[in-house]
Image (cartoon, rainbow, N blue to C red):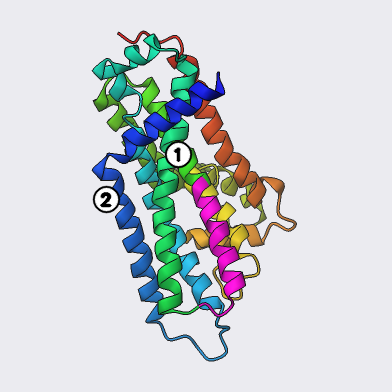
Amino acid sequence: MRDHQLAVMARKDFDDAVRSKAVWVVSALFALIAILATYRISQLNFPDGVPAGVVPKLVLVTLTNPITWIVPIIALVVGYMSVVGERRSGSLKLLLGLPFERAEIFVGKILGRTAVIGVSIAVGFLAMIVTIPVLVGLGAPGEFFVAILGLFVVTLLLGAVFTTLAVSVSALANTRRQAITTVFALFFVTHVAWTGVIQFLALPFGGVPRGGSGGWYLLLSYLSPTAAYTRVASLVFTNFPVPYPGIAMDGIGQRARIVESLQPTPFYLTEWFAILTLLAWAVGAGLLAHAVFRNADLG
């Protein structure tokens, strides 16, 4: 691949994607959810003695669950037509008639759509930066900005993963309907059904483990990209002085109780392994899609 051609394709795809009204509607929704969550926290009555710096961080913790819904949806909406749309319109053949290779088109679209997702995520986080100081204060500004910057970076990683998945699906699909169906199924499986499937698999072994034998259950649970995101996001809230840190951030208390019984924590349940899980989703999907796309009949 040639760097110049890759940059040209990424810029073209970025420009194409930002024209979509759906992207900006979902981005505005992300910003609105951030504002509403901040307002909700500001109306709570905290007991005396709670450090002022805890409240803005609590807002960020509260937002991690909506982020696991909104960011994948934005990424899938942005990316599902990136390749198949040009393939159906015939413009993909035109691009290949210019000095573009298939790998440059594929990777360029991933980079361009990821840039769009980055803008959408930035809009939401800017809303947080503006709203949180007004409604709940900062307490410890340095700690807050480190936390929100860390969460922003981790959220960008989640966005990049789902963008790669969406573009990969688009490269494999032959029609718009196939692309829509596949991204919907992908979101349903990775976000909605994953935990239920793992619990179903645990039934022959006595159900969800409740003790030190639950390492395998947690490993399978955290192979989901959205669950892995919550594990990585817990790095931002290390030593958080209220009961919301670490693995409990995904709202599934059973996981937290299992991991507490596993001391020391196995490597495959650490935040760093969760980062590898996210990267494996992106790299694996990209390699598979490119392997098919480079030899596909585009007629």
Inspect the image, locate mark 1, and give the three-letter code of the amino acid beneath it.
Thr
Q: Position of residue 245 (x, y in %)?
A: 58, 66
Which quadrant would residue 15 be assigned to in this image? top left
Q: Quadrant of residue 168?
A: top left
Q: Which residue is mark 1?
A: 114
Q: Position of residue 79 (x, y in %)?
A: 36, 34
Mark 1–mark 2 Cα distance, whole angstroms, equals 17 Å
Left or right, residue 212 beside residue 147: right
Q: In the rendering, which numbered label is found on residue 25?
A: 2
In this image, 296 relative to 225: left or right? Answer: left
Q: Quadrant of the N terminus?
A: top right
In the structure shown, which secondary structural element does the residue marked by tag 1 occupy? helix
Residue at image location 49% in from the left, 18% down from the top: 103
Predominant secondary structure in magenta?
helix
**Residue extent of the magenta highlight:** 138-156
Tell me the quadrant of the picture where the C terminus can be found: top left
Of residues 90 and 269, the one drawn nearer to the viewer in this rendering: 90
- Residue nearer the viewer, 146 or 11: 11
Asked whether 246 or 57 is in front, the reply is 57
- Along the horizontal axis of the image, is 16 left or right of 197? left
